Amino acid sequence: MYESVLPQSSKLEIDLSGASADTIETLPKWDLSDLYESTESEQLARDFAWLEMSCSDFRDKYEGKLESIDDSGLLASIVEYEQIESVIRRIRSFAELRYLQDTSDPERVKFDADCDEKITKLSAALVFFAIELNKIDDARLSALHDKNERLRKYRPFLEKTRNLKPYQLSMELEKFLHDKSVVGKSAWKRLFDETIAILEFEVEGEKKPLESALNMLLDHDRAKRQAAAEEIAKVLGSRITLFSRITSTLIKEKEIEDRWRKLESPQLMRHLHNNVEPEVVDALRQAVVSFYPDLSHRYYEIKAKWLGLDKLKIWDRMAPPPFKSNRKMSWSEAKTTVLDAFEAFSPTMADIARRFFNCNWIDAGVTPGKTAGAFCSSTSVNVHPYILLNYLGSPDDVITLAHELGHGVHQVLAAEQGELLADTPLTLAETASGFGEILTFESLMNATEDQLERKALLAEKVERTIATVVRQIAFYDFECRLHLARRENELTADEIGAIWMEIQQESLGPAFEFMDGYEYFWGYIPHFIHSPFYVYSYAFGDPLVNSMFSLYREEPSGFQEIYFDALRAGGSKHHSELLAPFGIDAADPNFWRNGMSIISGYIDELEAMD
């Protein structure tokens, strides 16, 4: 299914750098007409009517019959289910993308909610499918695969479905949970989004939305950064009881459902959906935590020296180093920079990325009510992806553009797998985006001989890597501890804040002195609300990308072929099979430790530049 109101992005906090109107020309907006012309579109009405008929017909045709179905019948059922899923994703994508363009617009809010409710009601007729697929005897299913070559294409889909078999409930309970979601978790998530969208932060006599207030944490002026941090703490603190209630309720709802499903841990459902073994994630987590002293702790000690401070305050964490310029890059410069970097690697990669610019598949401006951050939404394989940015011209914004275009290229290539197999598990979905980042970073580094500019770029690379690896594992640990604590009692704002501060002290290290009010900063991070335990996928992707890029540097001949084969595979292969051509074994703890050593090497380079 089309998951997440806030899809993939390593930019979990808003790293926007202010740009004046004369440095950034008019930025592109989405053309969503490839999905539907409008909310009154005849095609949208026809698709809803088709969906109502098809869901009902599908249930009448297949419910109660899958255990004894033959190979051609099983294939037909999966193909029909895939067609229904494609239409569902198309409608949901259209409603959601419109909503995320302006979450403060009541009409968009209502339309998105109405579509969600209609689809939830109609798709209740499909709940039986996964349950009955998992009732097919293993030996019988294997025989059906052996008999039908076309059916074998869908083996990965069936295997992922059957991974959930031990945790399925009765048909009645599964239908109940499906129907209840619109007034349960979906409603709480929407409340969070709408609350965040209307927050105002008054800094220097001017009221700003969250994005602009967070943007000030990147200002060269320390007094402005402090004022912004204190105002963010004040405003979040004024709503922290509501954010705590939303968080505690969603965690408890998940705990109840997990308990009924007999899941061994709160994280397990995410691991199952990501098709990754818990021990692999544990190996990654242990490697990152063990490297805290050599990564974030060491880097922030260096940064304190750059800023001439004995201790960093939280408003110094994202501060630009004093040798970083304020230069902004226009949209046309950003486009050229990224496309040239992609072209140098592969004309095919550049050609696909160029379509996003030429066909209005990007919404780049910062506008009132627009959702924060950046993402690439895959929509339906029968359409194309869409990218959302909040572009203001910093080098980091250019890297973010490359990141999301990496996702876009990946999703375009994987579309050939079809609706049920195109989606790559989150652990591997960040690989193409990270590769796009590193190609663009190398291009920026090669384009300048100025040593201070190179140092600034490398510092930004380290900061982004710490945000992608260290910070996301810290977020993961925060979630793990929250979910464990919520099993015992209701969580108050003070209790959540205490866990947050403990994790932050562990991950950021002794270079920091924490302000009063920082215990509220967990409150605006959407992934805790929308996608529990999503965050480790970012940390998973970075070492993979570093290893792939090292392989490319050592032996570029033939690399593009195996790289594009991996992207085209989408979700049709397990990570062990997908990564084998690169010589990568994610189950090996040494792989993750080596990945952390590569990041440490970036910090070594920075130290050598001082």
Image: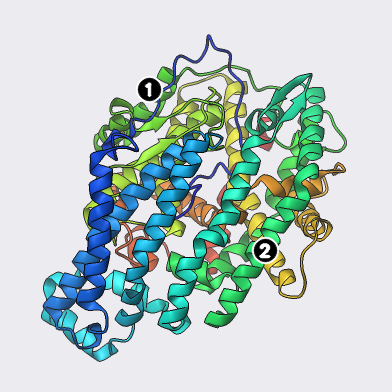
Q: Quadrant of residue 570?
A: bottom left
Asked if residue 592 can be seen in this view, the reply is yes
Asked if residue 565 can be seen in this view, the reply is no
**Is the residue 208 above or below the residue 284 in the image?**
above
Q: Which mark is residue 249?
A: 2
Q: What residue sits right under mark 1 in the picture?
A: 336
Q: The residue tagged with tag 1: helix, strand or loop?
A: helix
Between 553 and 536, the one lying in front of the other is: 536
Residue at position x 56%, y 35% in the image:
104
Amino acid type at circle 2 is: Thr
Picture coordinates of residue 587, whole percent (x, y): 48, 70
Picture coordinates of residue 306, whole percent (x, y): 76, 29
Between 340 and 410, the one lying in front of the other is: 410
Q: Quadrant of residue 601?
A: top right
Amino acid type at circle 1 is: Thr
**Is the residue 337 above or below the residue 567 in the image?**
above
Answer left or right for 26 relative to 563: right
Residue at position x 53%, y 33% in the image:
370
